[in-house]
Amino acid sequence: MHYPSLYFILLLLYTGCSTIQPTPSGSPRRAEKPNVILIMADDMGWGDVGFNGNKIVQTPALDKMAGDGIVFSRFYAAAPVCSPTRGSCLTGRNPFRYGVESANVGRMKPEELTLAEYLQQKGYRTGHFGKWHLGTLTNKEIDANRGGKDPADYSPPWENGFEVCFSTESKVPTWDPMTTPGSDAGDIGKRTPGTPFGTSYWTGPDKKVSDNLNGDDSRIIMDRVIPFIEEQSQNSQPFLAVVWLHTPHLPVLTGEKYRQLYAQQSPDVQQFYGSVSAMDEQIGRLRKRLKELGLDKNTLVFFTSDNGPEGKAQEGRTQGSTGGFKGRKRSLYEGGIRVPGIVVWPAHIKGGSQTDYPAVTSDYFPTIREILGDTSRPQVMPIDGVSLTAVWQQGLRERATMIGFQFGRQKAAVGNRYKLYINGTNTPELYDLSEDPFEARNIARKHPDELQKMQVFLDGFVQSCAASNAGADY
């Protein structure tokens, strides 16, 4: 089967519904254009939230969000590192299709249609807040990891459909983000503690921010998100707010108020989970303001992480938890790509729901297309994501196509039950995730037919991505 055609057929199947949507009680109603908020933590593991069973971390706002919406217990980042996953959120496509194959590699190509560009066409006001990581924000000075070094890397959010921006190219410290912390915070490179960190917040071409940049980085970001939402509320205009928080990516540290929440824990745990609780507080602040403005019912809010936790478990500030899943950041085992996943939309999603449906960040764009009743052929094909609306409307439990992954020498395919994992030329590994979610038993020899089926899919996926990256889709 020709691979792009398969994705085209699947997309049509999942985007062919009308804009009549059931309410949580089941009665039909015509959907208004929903506001859309995409919240993403950075390097947060599946097990770093209370609603997934963590007994140490305090995440009351996220736990309430989980209770108000649907929790995806099998939600996947499109990659085990940040930049590729972010690209998948905005395109509905695997990042290997346009050359964003790792962190600090590639850029959002101008030929790609981003979610922000698409929603602008639908009358939405669009804003990006926090970490961008899909290209540099300046060619005129040295900034962050790549800014000012290679003009070809320039691809800021304001050239990808975002009208309002408060964005950094890449990481910043999670407390006092413009200042280099001590080396115990991790990942400060050759910077000297107390000196400028060298990464700026930008609002547009040559426009750097110099005020309100002290304290908790999540609060600093939310101080820009909330006025953006208030403005759209006053104008009665639907909006897209992409809120990509830096927490709990290294360098990780927090303030005394949040460290005291974990006074009985080690100093590293206090800093790490303190930063998570500080971020959680700001997510609660955002949802509270949505309710005060009367926007909460028809605002579609997604929450996830860009990949699994950094480093080795419980080592220094890399205290993140996979919840027991194998692997961590940079691995295509479950711990590197299975992340927290919540969707809240009170007008249409019944609270307190949970699903084992395998979803991925590439599903955001197709989901929003279907909600808006768009059955046209996408501008750029193929699309790797599928719409998730049938999961909360009809209780859909199985995905119609597998999810493909690539990273370095690793490749993986995830289906409803089985997972194929390949690392270079090593023997393929097959796991039954329904019985062995921690990937302890390779059953490839026992299920040769399943292995072959998944291998055929994965080979086709890899070839299709290579063709896309060579320009076939444009």
Image (cartoon, rainbow, N blue to C red):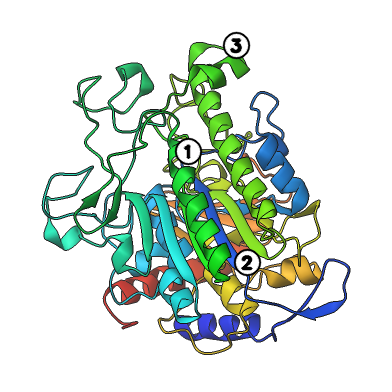
Query: Amino acid under label 2?
Result: Asp
**Could you tell which of marks 2 and 3 lies nearer the N-terminus?**
3
- Contact between marks 3 and 1 (CB within 8 A): the answer is no
* Residue carrying label 2: 449
Q: Residue at x 11, y 53 (%)?
A: 140
Q: Identify the image quadrant of residue 299.
A: bottom right
Badge 3 marks a residue whose secondary structure is loop
Q: Is residue 335 above or below residue 275?
A: below
Using the image as rendered, state which of residue 209 and residue 15 is in the foreground: 209
Using the image as rendered, state which of residue 174 and residue 392 is in the foreground: 174
Query: Amino acid under label 1?
Result: Ser
Mark 1, other Cα within 10 Å: few <14 / some 14–19 / many ≥20: many
**Could you tell which of marks 1 and 2 lies nearer the N-terminus?**
1
Query: Amino acid under label 3?
Result: Ala
Residue 109: x, y in percent? 28, 69
Q: Residue at x 83, y 66 (%)?
A: 24
Which is more foreground, mark 3 or mark 1? 1
Mark 2, other Cα within 10 Å: few <14 / some 14–19 / many ≥20: few
* Residue carrying label 3: 263
Residue 268: x, y in percent? 48, 17
- Contact between marks 1 and 2 (CB within 8 A): the answer is no
Residue 113: x, y in percent? 39, 76
* Residue carrying label 1: 218
Badge 1 marks a residue whose secondary structure is helix
Q: Is residue 470 above or below residue 363?
A: below
What is the CA distance from the residue labelled 3 to the residue labelled 1?
21 Å
* Residue 2 appears anywhere in the view: no
Q: Residue at x 28, y 73 (%)?
A: 110
